[in-house]
Image (spheres, coloured by chain):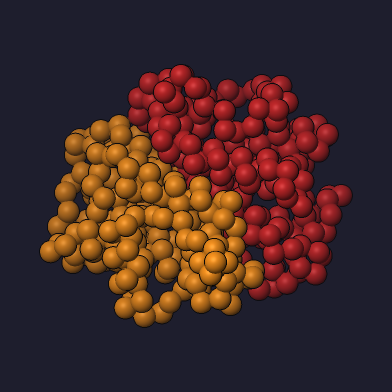
Chain colours: A orange, B red
Amino acid sequence: MAYINVPEGVPGIRSLAMFRPETGKHLYELAQVLLRGPSPLTEAEREIIATFVSSRNNCKFCANSHGAAAKVLLGDGAQLMDDVIKDYQTAGISDKLKALLNIAGKVQILGKEVKQQDIDSARLAGANDLDIHDTVLIAATFSMFNRYVDGLATLTPNEPGDYLEMGKRLAEKGYAVPQSQTVQQS
Amino acid sequence: MAHIDLKNDEPGIRGPMAYSPETAKPMNELAEILLRSENNSLTKGERELIGTYVSYLNDCFFCQSVHGAMAGYYMECDIQHINDLKQNFLNSDLSEKMKALLVIAGSVQKGGKYVTDEQIRYAREKGALDKEIHDTVLIAAAFCMFNRYVDGLGTSAPGDPQIYVNRAPMRAAQGYIGSVPAAVHE
């Protein structure tokens, strides 16, 4: 049971956007522009970063839903998502993405944990300013989403299968703010 | 010096926001509705104080200076009183409801799962409504994002707390949506 009176049976952040659409629309717009808008990082890379941070924050709902989206976007390389969560250093991803995940992991702890040498390593691996900016902001944003979803104890589906549809929707349609139940009924 | 070339000299979060106006827009709109909307049973001072307290826990100098000054402006008290509240709000003259909400905000800062049934029950007992609990959790979560964005990119900011106090009335009048230079938005 969520801590507040959100619509029953609706999972995670969707239930919160329906409870408070005034804030929900800006949160969904932020997710859309950050994860689907212009960026030197591919959509799959951005979902990997989001999933990695959510996993470190132990946010099962965000880790599973964004992990599922990443797998759809990765296509034949879907296994990479699980490999990154297991140990990103040995996963078959680019050195640049490894260096960016290192930065994301620091941001997950706290902003000040990002040191000059983390930035230098990322640049050496080919990351530019925008790569670094987008990585820091994705990690910061999921430090918010994860706390929002778990801080209000929203519904978290248990079965991995429950996330397949979600992942497909996020990969194909992106982040569209859910309509409130009253709007759907009318 | 920030970790990346932000192409502007704006202080704190204004630097990366001017660098990336597409993501700044929903972030500022979120701040506006959460902190400044008139349609809220928490006062603006109370909401700014929640943001200040979380920024203090995250050791983010820029955010706790800006929002501490805003809280002081709305609450009509000096910055020393705000500093005292950050360090020991439990022994202050804040309402019991506000103390209970700050405890919840402190848990969110650690991680969403740190919020307990007991903390929620106590806040309700002291009169907190669902929407107030929701907004407290989202403000706390949002500052975990803002703080990481500011410090994760190593932005710089004026060190004199009085500068932020002096600017607070202007920010209170103008709000957050116009806080990033318009020229960069174009």
Residue at 47%, 36% (x, y): give it.
B24
Q: Does any portion of residue B168 appear in the rendered image?
A: no
Q: Position of residue A125 (x, y in %)?
A: 19, 39
State the residue lying farthest toward the left. A76
Q: Nearer the viewer, residue A152 or B159?
A: A152
Q: Position of residue B124 (x, y in %)?
A: 76, 68
Q: Nearer the viewer, residue B180 or B5?
A: B180
Q: Position of residue B144 (x, y in %)?
A: 53, 48
Residue at 30%, 72% (x, y): give it.
A164
Quadrant including the N terminus of chain B: top left
Q: Is residue B60 above or below residue A150?
A: above
Q: Does any portion of residue A27 appear in the rendered image?
A: yes
Quadrant including the C terminus of chain B: top left
Q: Nearer the viewer, residue A158 or A111?
A: A158
Q: How many marks?
A: 0
Residue at 80%, 69% (x, y): give it.
B125
Q: Nearer the viewer, residue A107 or A19?
A: A19
State the residue lying farthest toward the front. A186
Q: Position of residue A1 (x, y in %)?
A: 58, 77
* In this rendering, position of residue B87 left or right of residue B3: right
* In this rendering, position of residue B66 left or right of residue B18: right
State the residue lying farthest toward the bottom. A159
Q: Is residue B159 above or below residue A61?
A: above
* In this rendering, position of residue B81 left or right of residue B63: right
Q: Is residue B111 above or below residue A28?
A: below
